[in-house]
Image (cartoon, coloured by chain):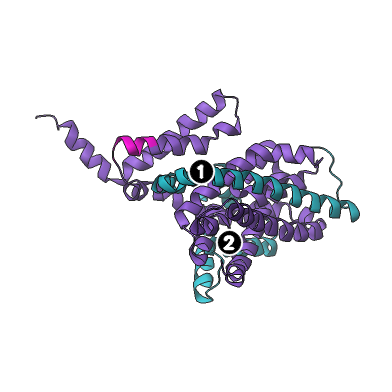
Chain colours: A cyan, B purple
């Protein structure tokens, strides 16, 4: 029963999120709003129900598997990818490196300044 | 009783969602085994290997993508509840998030701006096609959000989904190296940067390599950058007339 209750909570939040996204024609996808709704709910409740934790952590453990069906969709763009392969590769590598560098450096500087960075262990 | 001809069995199976759901799971199991055998290198990421195996399978059996997706959509559907479930690690780390509120805020804005501007700028300089540039713009954001954004701004949603995946894998390959070079040791900052640049892949990587704190911050970055990008990108594209 516990997994069913956990899944119901997740789907219920997602459903509320989808409804809000449609009703207010927000540019944010329903699941993201659902995540915020669940977070608010957990903060109000003050703890995570065991049923929700086992279902949620199970899903997050296999998160990468869930990307596979969409990824196979690359098969529909073989021509375009062949044509622009190097542009795509160089853009993705450089952009990821710069994004990681900027984000981590900005946070590092600010965390040090406000003295909130205590962890030095990995 | 005469046995069913093999061809007829195949036609029956290929038309039911069962076959391609099964194929997806088996491909992932095989890919994970190969990855473990190769010492867990992100170069042979289980997801990329699975996708390659499945594409080979579809080409060999002359199956089109919509037929495959009819079965695989059951897994794809779970992306929604999995995204909602990211609230759990966030809740667990709420105290830490509160203490790092200002760095988190600034990191999100700086990271999202860098991700979008660098992707659009570099691909424009290299002479990419218009639709490719627009499909690249949301590539740092987790796929359900990125596909929605691509559709809004005139990119190709399914191409964006693929680019999002590649971004995730590339982020896992170069991320640890960039963080070492930048002397980033705080697990919260490591996680946040990985989640911002490499969404769900970065998050999965952080949970398995840097631990629960990094994983939670990575999930936070994934959610926040998704929110910010979804709000900011469509009007920006209009403004610059891309």
Q: Residue furthest bottom?
A: A24
Q: Position of residue B62 (x, y in %)?
A: 28, 40
Q: Residue furthest left?
A: B1
Instruction: Tell me the tag on residue A32.
Output: 2
Q: Is residue B212 above or below residue B110?
A: above
**Which residue appears at 52% of the width and 74% of the height?**
A25
Which chain does tag 1 point to? A
Which chain does tag 2 point to? A
Can you identify the residue that label 1 sits on? A85
Image-quadrant location for residue A64: top right
Q: Main secondary structure of the magenta part?
A: helix
The local crowd at label 1, few if under 14, some if 14 to 19, many if 20 or more residues have their Cα within 10 Å, is some
Q: Secondary structure at mark 1?
A: helix
Q: Nearer the viewer, residue B66 or B124?
A: B124
Q: Does B58 lie within the magenta span?
A: yes
**Which residue appears at 45% of the width and 50% of the height?**
B76
Q: Secondary structure at mark 2?
A: helix
Span shown in magenta: B56-62
Q: Nearer the viewer, residue B34 or B44?
A: B44
Q: Quadrant of the C terminus of chain B?
A: bottom right
Q: Is residue A17 left or right of residue B22?
A: right
Mark 2 or mark 1, earlier in chain: 2
């Amino acid at each position: 029963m516990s997994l069913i209750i956990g899944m119901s909570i997740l789907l219920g939040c997602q459903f509320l999120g989808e409804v809000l996204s449609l009703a207010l024609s927000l540019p944010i996808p329903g699941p993201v709003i659902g995540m915020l709704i669940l977070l608010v709910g957990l903060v109000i409740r003050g703890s995570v129900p065991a049923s929700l934790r086992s279902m949620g952590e199970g899903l997050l453990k296999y998160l990468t598997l869930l990307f596979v069906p969409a990824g196979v969709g690359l098969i529909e763009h073989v021509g375009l990818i062949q044509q622009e392969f190097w542009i795509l590769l160089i853009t993705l590598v450089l952009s990821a490196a710069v994004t990681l560098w900027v984000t981590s450096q900005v946070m590092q500087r600010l965390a040090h300044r406000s003295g909130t960075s205590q962890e030095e262990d990995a | 009783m005469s046995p069913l001809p093999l061809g007829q069995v195949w036609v029956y199976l290929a038309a039911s969602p069962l076959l391609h759901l099964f194929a997806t799971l088996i491909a992932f199991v095989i890919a994970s085994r190969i990855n473990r055998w190769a010492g867990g290198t992100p170069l042979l990421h289980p997801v990329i290997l699975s996708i390659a195996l499945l594409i080979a399978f579809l080409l060999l059996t002359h199956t089109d993508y919509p037929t495959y997706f009819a079965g695989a959509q059951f897994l794809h559907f779970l992306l929604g509840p999995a995204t909602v479930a990211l609230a759990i690690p966030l809740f667990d780390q709420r105290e830490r998030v509160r203490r790092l509120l200002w760095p988190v805020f600034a990191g999100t804005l700086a990271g999202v701006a860098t991700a979008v501007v660098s992707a659009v700028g570099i691909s424009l300089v290299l002479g990419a096609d218009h639709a490719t540039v627009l499909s690249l713009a949301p590539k740092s954001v987790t796929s359900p959000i990125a596909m929605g954004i691509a559709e809004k701004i005139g990119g190709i949603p399914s191409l964006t989904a693929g680019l999002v995946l590649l971004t995730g894998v590339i982020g896992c390959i170069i991320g640890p190296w960039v963080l070492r070079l930048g002397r980033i040791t705080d697990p919260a900052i490591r996680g946040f940067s990985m989640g911002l640049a490499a969404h769900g892949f970065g998050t999965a990587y952080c949970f398995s390599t840097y631990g629960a704190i990094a994983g939670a911050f990575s999930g936070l970055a994934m959610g926040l950058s998704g929110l910010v990008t979804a709000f900011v990108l469509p009007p920006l594209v209009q403004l610059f007339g891309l």
